[in-house]
Image (tube, helix red, strand yellow):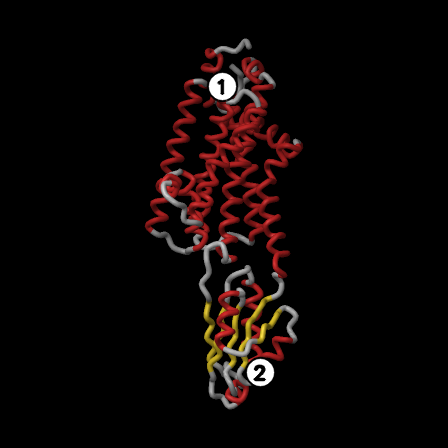
Amino acid sequence: MTTSSEPFSRQAKSISSPNHWRLIWAIARKDLVEIVTNTQFIVIALLPVVVFLLYRLMMMGIDNSSILDIAVYDLGASQLVNVMQENPALELHLVTSEAALQEQINEGPMSGLLIPANFDADVAAGLHPELNIWLNPERGMSSETIQWQRLVEAEIMQMGQQSLPAQIEWIELESEAFSSDTALNSFLLIVTLTMIFFLTGTNLVAMLITEEKEKQMGNVLINSPANPYHVVLGKALAGSVSIAAVLALVVLLNGGLTGNWPLALLYLAIALPISLSISTLTGSLAQSSKQCNSWLGLAMIIFLAPAWFSTMIELPEPFGTIFSVMPTHFLVAGLDDALNNSGVSATNSLNLTAWLVFMLVLVGTTFWRLRQNPKSVVASR
């Protein structure tokens, strides 16, 4: 290798020249073309999307999820039961006692309906009888449950006059973390979002850097206007565009973000320089793209997995304490809070601050590494 630190030092000073943005864009454009034409890069980029879609398809086919199971205890042969039996989206389980109704609701799991005696006659007489309905959030039936609510209300309206002639009490049942469709959807979305940054993003940029080292990019740079900093910024730009594209696709497939979505986007914005810093450091240390493939992906799984599961389940000590101080714990916990709540809690403020501090430390470490050895991103030892 004929490179030396002196040419790189001189070229590093030229980063402020008027043409440096053209050089950065030229490198980024070349890398973007490679990303969309290289099969390996395409697989890495679309892996989070594939995981997300497989989960969606799996949930659509599990447990006959287009059918809503409802336990019904009818004390008076109400016509409401006949109407629901004619609806193909509903599967009624008729029981003969209130105890059996509660047992079906608790062990099914399924929603429940208790129709009192003389319900139809009381509705027709305008007496506003009570109708108890238990909404079970398990099995991911939120849309079907909403349709059932509208069906019940519309049918009772037809039985009475202009106003709703019954006092309906909708009782939402509590469920465990992994039983709730909302919680599971939120968990899988968080897993996918973090994969985009720390599996797709880190691997793409690190491999782009190591590929240039394998192609002896250091020799080329000695006789070109570009320098190692242009290379890093160009590849970071290409990685940012790729991350943004995959992120937008997943958010679109998810139907948008819920809760305090600006706060969720802020967490992801902070994750971007962290992802780029990790990939740049890895690219400067690794000597080949094969090395990136062999251990960067594993390192990122170790980096993420404890945060994924410690947020959703209570881990035994000392693992709970150890995982709670990992940097990614603050990202996952903050995203979970932001996506499921509209406000900003004190805990979320702490998570955001810790995640921001980690970003500053990692970005600072990356700048120090490049300042000490700028040629490490373009030349092998």
From this view, report whether residue 49 is shown above or below residue 134. above
- Whether residue 350 sits left or right of residue 230 in the image: it is left
Q: Residue at x 47, y 84 (%)?
A: 129
Tell me the distance, in whole angstroms, between the alpha carbons under discs 1 and 2: 76 Å
Residue identifier under label 1: 376
Q: Quick check: marks 1 and 2 in contact, CB under 8 Å? A: no
From this view, report whether residue 360 is shown above or below residue 262. above
Q: Nearer the viewer, residue 222 or 100?
A: 100
- Whether residue 234 sits left or right of residue 61 in the image: it is left
Residue identifier under label 2: 158
The quarter holding residue 270 reads top left
Q: Nearer the viewer, residue 271 or 78?
A: 78
- Residue 345, horizontal then vertical, whole percent: 35, 52
Q: Quadrant of the N terminus?
A: top right
Circle 2: element type = helix
- Residue 179, horizontal then vertical, whole percent: 50, 57
Looking at the image, can residue 19 be seen? no
Which of disc 2 and disc 1 is earlier in sequence?
2
The quarter holding residue 247 reads top right
Question: Label 1: few (<14), some or many (≥20) within 10 Å?
Answer: many
Q: Residue at x 49, y 10 (%)?
A: 4
- Residue 142, horizontal then vertical, whole percent: 54, 63
Amino acid tagged 2:
Gln
Amino acid tagged 1:
Ser
Q: Residue at x 48, y 75 (%)?
A: 99
Question: Label 2: few (<14), some or many (≥20) within 10 Å?
Answer: some
